[in-house]
Structure formats: structure tokens, C-alpha cells
Image (cartoon, rainbow, N blue to C red):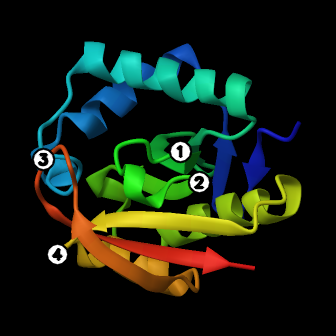
Amino acid sequence: MTTCLCTPRLTLRRWREDDLDAMAEINSDPEVMRWIGDGSVQDREQTAARIAVWERAWEELGVGLFAVECRDTGRLAGFTGLSVPLFLPEVLPAVEIGWRLGRPFWGRGLATEAARAALDFALRERGLARIVSIHTVGNEASERVMRKLGMRMERETVHPLSGRRVRVRVLET
């Protein structure tokens, strides 16, 4: 099973223990988290629990969220990858592609580069024919990445937990 992918600038890989502090720093940034769920930040303990869930998904589903590491520095930039969007039952069954990068990594095309690699993995190695991506209305940066990936608008709805408006984009092969 491939669980490590390389792009010109990034390595997408499984999570390691030494990723926790860097990911907790990303999750504790209010600007990073403003479009996630209800916009709440996450502490180190919550981040550790999330990473455990992401790793368990790899074991149970054969897909998951990759840790995204910059090849030139070895720094953790955030994550990208695949998950089941259980928080939005109206789109199920589905696999979602998503990403979250720390602010120092914004505006350089890294989210698109990482997401393209994860999307290729989903289509070629996992044989998925339909991928969704969900973003909070107003998150222009994520919407741009989705457009660059060739995803089309499927619907606008309300996140059942946060009450925020979200858009669902889809790519079907």
C-alpha cells in the first residue's frame, strides 16, 4: 500500500510522533481554523486525538490524511488527503479530499500541489470514481484549490453541527 507520495516540493506521508507539536501549532492558530467547523482552535490534546483518528482511518479504510512535509526543510506544513465526511450525511456515501496548512505555507501553491497528489492517489491507486470537497462559504482560498483540481459545484447546504453555509464540490471520472 502506497502511503508516501512525493511532489517537486513536498512529501506526503503517514504521521509520526514528532509531528504532534507542529500540527498542534497549526490547529491553535485562529486564522487557520476560522473556516474549519465552527472556527474553534484545537489544543495539543485535541490534535493528538485527531491524528490518532487519521491514522486509524488508514488502517480501517485504506485512505486517510497525509502529513505534508516540505522536502527542502523537513518542516511539517499541515495535511492533505482523504476522509469520509461523516459530519455531512447528505453527501454520503462519499470520500472527501481536504487540506489544512499552517500560515507560513499559504500563498505558494502548496495546498494545490499536495491535493493534486492526493487526488491522483485516490483515482489511480484506490480506484475512486467520485471525490467531494467541502468548504465553508467565504473560504475563497480553498474554493480556488477545488477549482484548480477541476471540481465542479454540486450544492450549497448547511453544516449540521456549526450551522455555517458550506459548498460541496465534486469530481467524477
Image location of residue 112, percent across then percent down: 52, 71
Residue 51 lies, in percent from the top left, at: 47, 24
Give the label, 1 or 4, closer to the camera: 1
Earlier-in-chain disc, 2 versus 4? 2
> Which type of secondary structure does the marked residue at label 3 adopt?
loop
Q: What residue sits right under mark 3 in the picture?
A: 39
Residue behind mark 2: 95
Question: In the rendered view of the protein, which quadrant contains the C terminus?
Answer: bottom right
Looking at the image, which is closer to me, 165 or 59?
165
Residue 7 figure quarter? bottom right
Mark 1 vs 4, N-terminal side:
1
Estimate how packed mark 3 is, as few (under 14), some (14 to 19) or many (20 or more) residues with alpha carbons within 10 Å: some
Residue type highlighted by circle 1: Val
Alpha-carbon span between mark 2 and mark 4: 22 Å
Q: Is residue 120 visible?
A: yes
For label 4, the residue is: 138
Q: SS of the residue at dot 1?
A: loop
Q: Look at mark 1 in the image and give the residue it sits on.
A: 84
Do residues under tags 1 and 4 come within 8 Å of each other at their CB atoms? no
Q: Amino acid at mark 4?
A: Gly
Q: Residues within 10 Å of mark 4 (few under 14, many from 20)?
A: few
Q: Earlier in the sequence, mark 1 or mark 2?
A: 1
Q: CA distance from mark 1 to mark 3?
A: 20 Å
